[in-house]
Amino acid sequence: MRISELSATSGVPIPTIKYYLREGLLPTGAQTSATRAEYGESHLRRLRLIRALLEVGRLPIASIRKVLTAVDDESLSMHHVLGTAHYAIAPPVEPPAAGEEWRRARAGADALIDDLGWRIDPEAPTRDELAHAILALDRLGMPATGEALRPYAETAARLVAEHEIGTIPVGGPREAAVEALVLGTVLHGRVLDVMRRLAQESASAHIFGISYGADGPRDGDGPRRLPGGDDSRDENGPRGEGGPRARNGPHGEDGPRTRNG
Amino acid sequence: MRISELSATSGVPIPTIKYYLREGLLPTGAQTSATRAEYGESHLRRLRLIRALLEVGRLPIASIRKVLTAVDDESLSMHHVLGTAHYAIAPPVEPPAAGEEWRRARAGADALIDDLGWRIDPEAPTRDELAHAILALDRLGMPATGEALRPYAETAARLVAEHEIGTIPVGGPREAAVEALVLGTVLHGRVLDVMRRLAQESASAHIFGISYGADGPRDGDGPRRLPGGDDSRDENGPRGEGGPRARNGPHGEDGPRTRNG
């Protein structure tokens, strides 16, 4: 296809495609004359990947180039290519700190990874990333032991094993696999983060006895015990449409209510 | 205590304390003379909170001021004060998009929150944040239904209910509660994110039969089935110290191995 069709099909404007060509991110098409080039499916796949890396991954051009170089390098395994992309889209990792404090944090990260039995490249930048998180917690006097962090690891492992495995098409073109990895990792990472904050808000509302009805938020009886995990439902319906509760005193110990729903 | 002791105890340099005083983030101490002021525990708590909002929350001064105003406003409930801080530390939310596409995404977010029975303020910016995530997935042709996103919601709900409830000291000074909320939400959010990416890397290594031994990474037999969730252990020990595997052909169907460990 001509560049105009490549642009129309991919949704990428022609000047942008020419920019990618100049930067060497997109391979040139087959020259059919001095002024015409023909592009194919592989160019479409490449454009999709570049857009994913740029717009979703929010990567600088240099990082995009690094990922694409790996994609093009046939001597690299698919695992290595995916790994290059996976590391590229991670938040920028601060350089390792110095001193005993850092060594302890990094040792803690390595020990936790070992204890979990996870297979992680010894050179993975994610090890330093975890160490920085441990260091930050530790400096603020928050628990940063393997035991304190294990719930986060096990939560993540279960999510990945039950819902994220198999979403990367590893048997086909590399661009498609890397694109799926980038989109899934970044976009579902954002989903998980906002869901956690929504769950925290809901838990707080339960504890403080807040419900949201058609008349706006209503304070309940004060702090109450939180109903369990993902079965938690507002007894008055999702929007707190129940009637007034009996007032049980300032700290709202459970007691009979006058009316529900 | 004098400003020098406030600085020494809090670890905040005197010029920085004076900056916070000028900006009205820190209330003035009690003037004991024209040139001396006395500071107390409340000032220490306030400094800790400002540092948490600035250094961990990475908030601009305007947002910090908004949170502190809420802390100081006795007419606001603790739930409201915590909510102000919780929204302030969220990633910046793009303004709602326009049009049918956006209305659908926002309706999807609201419906999912309702289906989960979560108590979320109708005006919560997290609703728009979730809608933007849904819109991004949808535009890229990725599943964005309630069913597709429910695993993330349920994962988050379980994590919050089992491990994050009760970590905020709601019965004491407001600064302490807000500080705990900011530190926990931001720092454990980073832990969860890096743990998810570590789990993804480990799952990929299993699928591609990569193990990491003392001699460096070794490719196994090719793609293999992933052992289950958080019980996954490398059969050769955490660092892939087992011996060579029998080669089962290019796609590595499971078969007898010559030797393990």
Image (cartoon, coloured by chain):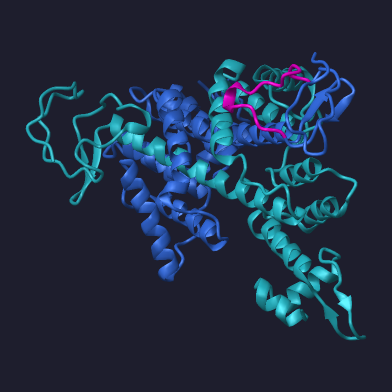
Chain colours: A cyan, B blue
Q: Position of residue A118 (x, y in %)?
A: 69, 25
Q: Residue at x 82, y 56 (%)?
A: A65
Q: Per the image, is B232 magenta?
A: yes
Q: Is A109 displayed left or right of A259 in the figure?
A: right
In magenta, the rendered stretch is B224-239
Q: Position of residue A229 (x, y in %)?
A: 37, 29
Q: Residue at x 57, y 32 (%)?
A: A156
The single residue placed furthest to the top in the displayed view is B261
Q: Residue at x 74, y 37 (%)?
A: B223
Q: Position of residue B76 (x, y in %)?
A: 29, 39
Which quadrant of the figure contains the N terminus of chain A? bottom right
Depth order, front residue of A195/B33: A195
Residue B72 visible in the snapshot: no
Which quadrant of the figure contains the C terminus of chain A? top left
Q: Position of residue A10 (x, y in %)?
A: 67, 71
Position of residue A19 relative to residue A196, above or below, is below
Position of residue A79 relative to residue A252, above or below, is below
Q: Main secondary structure of the magenta part?
A: loop
Where residue B41 sits, quadrant-wise, is top left
Q: Residue at x 66, y 19 (%)?
A: A112
Q: Is B79 displayed left or right of B219 in the figure?
A: left
Q: Please tell me how many numbered marks the rendered image carries.
A: 0
Depth order, front residue of A58/B125: A58
